Image (tube, grey):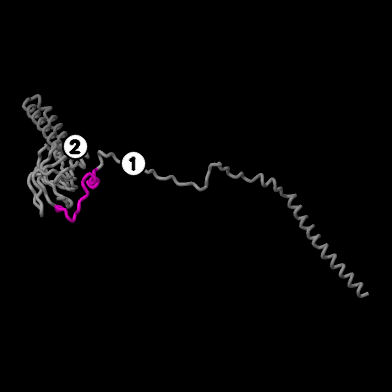
């Protein structure tokens, strides 16, 4: 009897273990059925926005453009020329241990071999010839020694009274049949001191101011003489004040406006004939090979 009860209980437990998962599975299925009745998954998918289209040539790893190899350059005729860039045209095979050194700061009195003006183009080359010998340790630079030079900057007279400009640099010396590098500047031109190596035409801005004032003054003087003539005539006395009043207005206008009118005035031209005297000063040591 006891074994029969045990067998019955074991059978009931086995049935429960088998049936309960099936019941649970059916409950889950019923819930899922309820969700499908209320919501349509295919309709939700259709309502979503479309993904953006990409072209087949698009590449996420874009490479940056490479900079141009040849950068734009300024006009060589207007650019300032550097003397250092011209050293290759002179002999560089010099043994400084045996060469004779001419110290920087040495001055040479020379004359120009060409006509020079503010209209001379930048880059034009010419020569100077020494007028007196210059003695250094172990060597004397004789009269007639030739220096090479170049126009490094120039411009014609400009407005605001700015005069013409000429800037000259010494680039070499011809000694013992060799062309040797030399770096020098101009310190005097026609016995006048030159500052910053710039030979300039006369600055005429203030002269332009004075010219405008003089124009007003001359016009006022004319109107004053006209007023005096009219005053001597009984009939002219009535209108005699008009000329001098007009002259006063013009003179005042010229006087007050002269600083503005003078802006359009150009400076003085620069012209240096061949054979003019200059003074050269070395900016670097010069080495002479004996």
Question: Could you tell whether 207 is left or right of 72 in the image?
Answer: left
Q: Which residues are magenta?
A: 80-104
Give the image location of residue 2, x and y in percent: 91, 75
Lower sequence index among marks 1 and 2: 1
Q: Quadrant of the N terminus?
A: bottom right
Give the image location of residue 173, x and y in percent: 16, 45
Secondary structure of the magenta portion, mostly? loop
Give the residue displayed 29% in from the left and 41% down from the top: 74
Q: Residue furthest left?
A: 232
Q: Is residue 95 located in the magenta-colored stretch of the structure? A: yes
Q: Inspect this view and state whether residue 170 appears.
A: no
Give the image location of residue 222, x and y in percent: 10, 30
Nearest the viewer among 288 and 30 is 288
Q: Is residue 131 located in the magenta-colored stretch of the structure? A: no
**Secondary structure type for disc 2:** loop
Nearest the viewer among 256 and 144 is 144
Give the residue displayed 9% in from the left and 32% down from the top: 221
Nearest the viewer among 151 and 125 is 125
Disc 1 residue crowd, few under 14, some 14–19, many 20+, Cα 10 Å: few
Badge number at residue 164: none
Q: Residue furthest right?
A: 1
Residue marked by disc 2:
120
Query: For residue 162, which quarter of the picture?
Result: top left
Disc 2 residue crowd, few under 14, some 14–19, many 20+, Cα 10 Å: some
Residue marked by disc 1:
72
Give the residue displayed 50% in from the left and 48% down from the top: 61
Above or below for 2 versus 151: below
Q: Inspect this view and state whether residue 154 appears.
A: yes
Question: Could you tell whether 1 is left or right of 81 in the image?
Answer: right
């Amino acid at each position: 009897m006891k074994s029969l009860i045990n067998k019955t209980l074991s059978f009931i437990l086995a049935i429960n273990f088998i049936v309960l998962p099936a019941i649970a599975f059916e409950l889950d299925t019923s819930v899922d059925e309820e969700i499908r009745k209320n919501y349509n998954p295919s309709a939700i998918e259709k309502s979503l926005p479309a993904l953006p289209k990409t072209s087949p040539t698009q590449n996420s790893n874009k490479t940056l453009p490479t900079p141009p190899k040849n950068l734009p350059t300024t006009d060589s005729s207007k650019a300032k020329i550097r003397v250092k860039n011209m050293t290759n045209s002179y002999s560089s095979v010099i043994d400084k241990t045996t060469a004779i050194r001419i110290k920087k700061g040495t001055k040479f009195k020379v004359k120009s071999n060409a006509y020079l003006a503010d209209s001379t183009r930048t880059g034009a080359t010419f020569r100077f010839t020494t007028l007196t010998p210059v003695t250094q340790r172990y060597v004397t630079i004789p009269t007639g020694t030739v220096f090479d030079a170049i126009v490094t900057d120039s411009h014609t007279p400009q407005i605001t009274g700015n005069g013409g400009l000429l800037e000259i640099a010494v680039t070499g010396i011809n000694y013992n049949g060799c062309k040797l590098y030399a770096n020098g500047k101009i310190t005097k031109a026609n016995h006048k001191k030159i500052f910053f190596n710039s030979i300039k035409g006369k600055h005429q801005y203030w002269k332009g101011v004075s010219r405008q004032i003089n124009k007003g003054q001359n016009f006022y003087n004319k109107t004053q003489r006209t007023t005096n003539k009219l005053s001597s005539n009984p009939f002219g006395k009535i209108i005699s004040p008009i000329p001098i009043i007009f002259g006063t207005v013009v003179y005042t206008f010229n006087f007050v406006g002269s600083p503005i009118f003078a802006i359009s005035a150009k400076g003085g031209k620069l012209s240096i004939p061949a054979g003019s005297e200059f003074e050269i000063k070395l900016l670097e040591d010069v080495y002479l090979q004996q």
